[in-house]
Amino acid sequence: MLPYTTYLIDLDGVVYRGNELLPGAREFVQWLEANGKKYIFLTNNSFATGSQILAKLERLGIPATPEHLMSAGQAAMQNIARRLPGARVYIVGEQPLVELAQEYGLTVVEVDAEEADVVLVGLDRFFDYSKLTCAVRIVLAGALFITINRDPLLPIAGGGFLPGCGTLAAAIEAGTGVTPEVVGKPEPMLLLEAMERLGSKPEETVMIGDGLDVDILAGQAAGTHTILVLSGRNNRADIEVSPIKPEHVYEDLADLLRQLQQVKS
């Protein structure tokens, strides 16, 4: 634990489950603050805004500020703005994603545009044939093609599903033959952009998550250390049969915190 100056922390299944705060989450964040650690909460969510996620953390008793949260949408904008400052972006997505692009100094083109530098795909409940046609034409003309994540389905309250942004990206991919760059976990871009913001290196950073094939795989791809907590998706039996092995395993953040408190910061 001694080399870890930076903690990248998944939310659902690690900090909370639904509207329930998980054991040790509040105390773990207090420990990070007290010991001067750098940390960011990470989420693949392309639908909820940053303010909505921060408000949820506040309701659960975890004070959080914007610098301690990075969504896959933010990571995408940060990455595009660094590679193509002021780029024209065609967005398959809803208003929060449009506003986020504008915050990063990017130019959002109209939904019927014929040209752009980038096609960026997020969750879009108003996706239609016209948007598909424009996105396909722009990618075929040479635009960079990026999707927030490749999740085909988005779970919703009551046990149902919506098509996720991965489904929308797949339609554009089918029409163009171009494979999109993926921002969200298990790809490494979200983690790399978080470390870019914090000024941290992979060797001093640890990814904490509850999913072997999402969080731990992303950490390995980004070159960070990895911690799996068993308060979410995976259990010890899953670890036994998975080719993806975390460096450390704890029951939850409370269990992790007990270990950290035994190590001199």
Image (cartoon, rainbow, N blue to C red):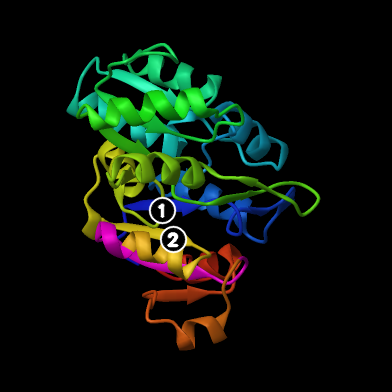
Callout 2 amino acid: Asp
The residue at 60%/53% (across/down) is 12
In the depicted structure, whether residue 244 falls above or below residue 99 = below
Asked if residue 255 lies in the magenta stretch, the reply is no
Report whether 200 appears left or right of 251. left
Does the image show residue 95? yes
Nearer to us of marks 2 and 1 is: 1
Residue 63, quarter of the rendered image: top right
Mark 2 residue element = helix
Q: Position of residue 161 (x, y in %)?
A: 69, 50
The residue at 77%/54% (across/down) is 159
Residue 215 disc label: 2
Which stretch did the figure color magenta?
A: 220-232
Q: Position of residue 57 (x, y in %)?
A: 64, 39
Q: Which image quadrant: the N terminus?
A: bottom left
- Circles 2, 1 touching at the beta carbon (< 8 Å): yes
In the depicted structure, whether residue 119 falls above or below residue 229 = above
Q: Earlier in the sequence, mark 2 or mark 1?
A: 1
Q: Which image quadrant: the C terminus?
A: bottom left
In the depicted structure, whether residue 118 falls above or below residue 246 = above
Residue 185 disc label: 1
Q: Nearer the viewer, residue 82 or 202?
A: 82
Q: Nearer the viewer, residue 190 or 93?
A: 93
Q: How many marks?
A: 2
Asked if residue 231 lies in the magenta stretch, the reply is yes
The residue at 55%/48% (across/down) is 30
Report whether 19 appears left or right of 153. right
